Amino acid sequence: MKASSEKCIVCERSVEKGSKPSFCRLHLETYRSIVGNYEKWRNAYGDLTPEEFLRRLENNNYAGKWVKEVARVMLSNRGLLQFFLNDLSYSGMKG
Ligand SMILES: [Zn+2]
């Protein structure tokens, strides 16, 4: 079950333990903040789909480098996008 040589899907750092998708600590924190921000963005912009949200982040001059990297990788892979959607609905149900 150990995958100590596993690399972050965005950068070359090793994967944070228990991270799904496989992010390093920095990208995992960024990913979580993106999930948390979706609700705020949707409130501000109205009907904003998760994909549209990620595209806006990717092209946002005010977004940090980490945010853009995570947004880009989520958009590049269907499985990752699905993971993002699942995390959104989970956090939505809690709130
Ligand atoms: Zn990383």
Image: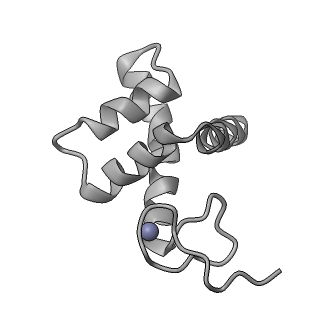
Q: Quadrant of the C terminus?
A: top right
**Rendered position, 47 above or below 52:** above
Total residue callouts: 0
Residue at screen point 62% across, 38% down:
88
Give residue 52's position: percent from left, percent from top. Answer: 42, 24
Ligand 1 quadrant assignment: bottom left
Give residue 74's position: percent from left, percent from top. Answer: 50, 44
Residue 85 found in image quarter = top right
**Rendered position, 51 above or below 80:** above
Q: Quadrant of the N terminus?
A: bottom right
Q: Is residue 67 left or right of residue 61?
A: right
Camera-nearest residue between 34 and 13: 13
Give residue 46's position: percent from left, percent from top. Answer: 42, 14
Q: Is residue 90 left or right of residue 77?
A: right
Residue at screen point 65% across, 78% down:
17
**Rendered position, 83 above or below 45:** below
Camera-nearest residue between 47 and 40: 47
Residue at screen point 45% across, 78% down:
13
Residue at screen point 66% across, 37% down:
82
Give residue 9's position: percent from left, percent from top. Answer: 51, 62
Figure coloring = one colour
Q: Is residue 11 left or right of residue 87?
A: left
Extreme residue toward the right, this view:
1
Extreme residue toward the top, this view:
47
